[in-house]
Image (cartoon, rainbow, N blue to C red):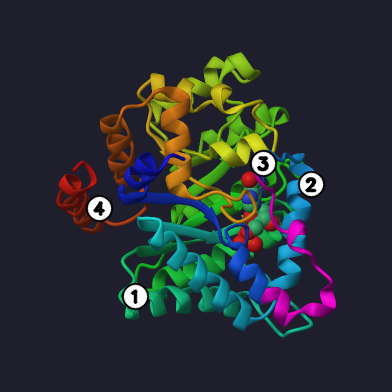
Amino acid sequence: MDSEADAFYRELPKVELHAHLNGSVSVQTIEKLLVRKPHLNVERSMTAIGKGQRRTLDECFQVFKVIHQLVDTEEDILMVATDVIKEFAADGVKYLELRSTPREEKNTGLTKKRYVETVLKAIQQCRNEDVDIDVRFLVAIDRRNGAQVAMETVKLAEEFMLSSDGLVVGIDLSGDPTVGHGKDLLPALQSAKNCGLKLSLHLSEVLSQLEETDLLLDLPPDRIGHGTFLHPEVGGSEDLVQKVLKNNIPLELCLTSNVKGQTVPCYAKHHFNHWYQLGHPCVICTDDKGVFATDLSQEYQLAASTFGLSREAVWKLSHQAIDCTFAPDAVKQQLRNKWAELKPQVFQ
Ligand code: 5GP
């Protein structure tokens, strides 16, 4: 990035809606974890995919397994979550919805409940330190773990939605898209919706999911993660596109993640353009800023340079993302006020 453009994108107030906690761990935090766990013999190259490198989606999921080995105690989670929140804040993110899969680790005594409590503690600590970012949490269902765990995860999320003073706002469905079928998870997702949790679902991340996507779109979800293969030009269908348009379901789009994970061939062919041209709500996100070695400023700049967006258009994109958050209306209004306050400074 050239330095002048760099400053514009960094100063731009941003909303991040698709960030997996353990995929967002920076090199600096990985270093600290490596010092804590030298016996694991993990090398830095095993936890991130550098510039110009690509991996298959399957290889990306192997990377998460390595990071999970490094992050397996309450202490680790607290450090990782605090660092990730502060890094997003330093990148100009004013509102963040972090997502993570609660894990239980027999070796360290970590439970799923403590996992969520620890992430919430990190959010609270950052608030107490006046870090300039509003953070909410989505409890993630890993589709690999099947229907029963999905239902338990929803119960856990519901408990925290009721007790966390608005910090837990929804459910994420993620995990290896080639494993399992969404129809088995429908009861859990429906029950989440019934109790007032918002739904952000990874949909059509790979081509083989047309039937599943069709089924899950009928819920309908409140947001879609990726949606790479929804439109007919890449093997999706007009019916799927119409369902998304009819329900006006925002898309969380992660350019570098999709290019490095090889689900799109190059930036210029990213489906952002398809949906943006339709005027559909698109939110630029990082997905896994640590693993894919990026940040949100860079993702905005990549979208702008690839698709020829003016600075005013970029501003509009970041402003419209506020409407797509799962925050209460009063918080959305506060964010709009903040954007209005910051605009002269960003465009000076
Ligand atoms: P965590 O939930 O442990 O905080 O973050 C890592 C997890 O997020 C991964 O194990 C995986 O379940 C999910 N994840 C991260 N990035 C992606 C992605 O691009 N696609 C899907 N489907 N899941 C992802």
Residue tagged 2: 59
How much space separates mark 1 and mark 4, taking CA atoms?
18 Å
Q: Does the CB distance between marks 2 and 1 fall below 8 Å?
A: no
Q: Quadrant of the C terminus?
A: top left
**Element assignment for label 4:** helix
Residue tagged 4: 332
Residue 44 place in picture, x, y as percent:
73, 62
Mark 4 or 3: in front is 4
Residue 303 place in picture, x, y as percent:
45, 32
Answer with left or right where residue 43 lies relative to residue 335. right
**Callout 4: 10 Å neighbours few (<14), some, many (20+)?**
some
Residue tagged 3: 183
Name the N-terminal-most of marks 1 and 3.
1
Residue 241 place in picture, x, y as percent:
50, 22
Name the N-terminal-most of marks 3 and 2.
2
Q: Nearer the viewer, residue 311 or 228?
A: 311
Vertical order, 39 against 273 (above or below) = below
Residue 206 included in the magenta stretch of the image: no
**Element assignment for label 3:** helix
The span shown in magenta is 33-51
Mark 3 or 2: in front is 2
Q: Outermost residue toward the front?
A: 3
**Callout 1: 10 Å neighbours few (<14), some, many (20+)?**
some
Residue tagged 1: 127
Amino acid identity at mark 2: Glu
Mark 2 or 4: in front is 2
How much space separates mark 2 and mark 4, taking CA atoms?
37 Å
Answer with left or right where residue 225 lies relative to residue 85. right
Q: Residue at x 31, y 50 (%)?
A: 11
Mark 1 or 3: in front is 1
